[in-house]
Amino acid sequence: MRREEYISDDMVVKRANAAIRLELEKKKAMDIPVIVYDRETQAVYQEHSDGTRVKVGKRMRKGRYSERVAKKA
């Protein structure tokens, strides 16, 4: 594959976001709950198609993996 045939990083991000949006809409239409992470509360929720949320967990660790590994070394 030649360099001219590649798509830009922006296009990859747009396509990934569109795929996620379509999958969430599909699950909502099929009445299948989805798992979402709320950054503000740092909790994991199960969200139903009618908008109700059930807390199913919380964040286990803080920081990025590379930061945690660097501290141990």
Image (tube, rainbow, N blue to C red):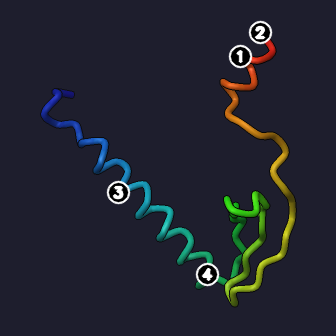
Q: Is residue 56 toward the left or the right of residue 51 in the image?
A: right
Q: Name the amino acid, label 3.
A: Lys
Question: Residue type at mark 1?
Answer: Ala
Q: CA distance from mark 3 to mark 4?
A: 21 Å
Callout 1 secondary element: helix
* Depth check, front residue: 48 or 27: 48
Numbered disc 4: secondary structure: helix
User: On screen, 18 above or below 59?
Assistant: below
Q: Measuring from the top left, give residue 33's x and y in whole percent.
A: 73, 75
Q: Earlier in the sequence, mark 4 or mark 2?
A: 4
- Camera-near label (4 vs 2) is 2
Q: Marks 1 and 2: in contact by CB < 8 Å?
A: yes
Q: Quadrant of residue 36?
A: bottom right
For the residues marked 2 and 3, what is the alpha-carbon distance in whole angstroms?
Answer: 37 Å
In the image as oriented, which residue stretches furthest toward the bottom? Answer: 50
Give me the disc on residue 17. none
Q: Amino acid type of disc 4?
A: Lys
In the picture of the structure, the residue carrying the numbered disc 2 is: 73
- Mark found first going from the N terminus, 3 or 4: 3
Foreground of the two, 48 or 70? 70
- Asked if the residue under mark 3 is in contact with the one under mark 2, i.e. CB atoms within 8 Å, the reply is no
Residue drawn at point x = 61 percent, y = 81 percent: 28
Q: Which residue is mark 4?
A: 28
Q: Horizontally, is 23 left or right of 73 in the view?
A: left
Q: Residue 9 placed where, x, y %? A: 31, 42
Give the label on residue 70, or none: 1
Q: Secondary structure at mark 2?
A: loop
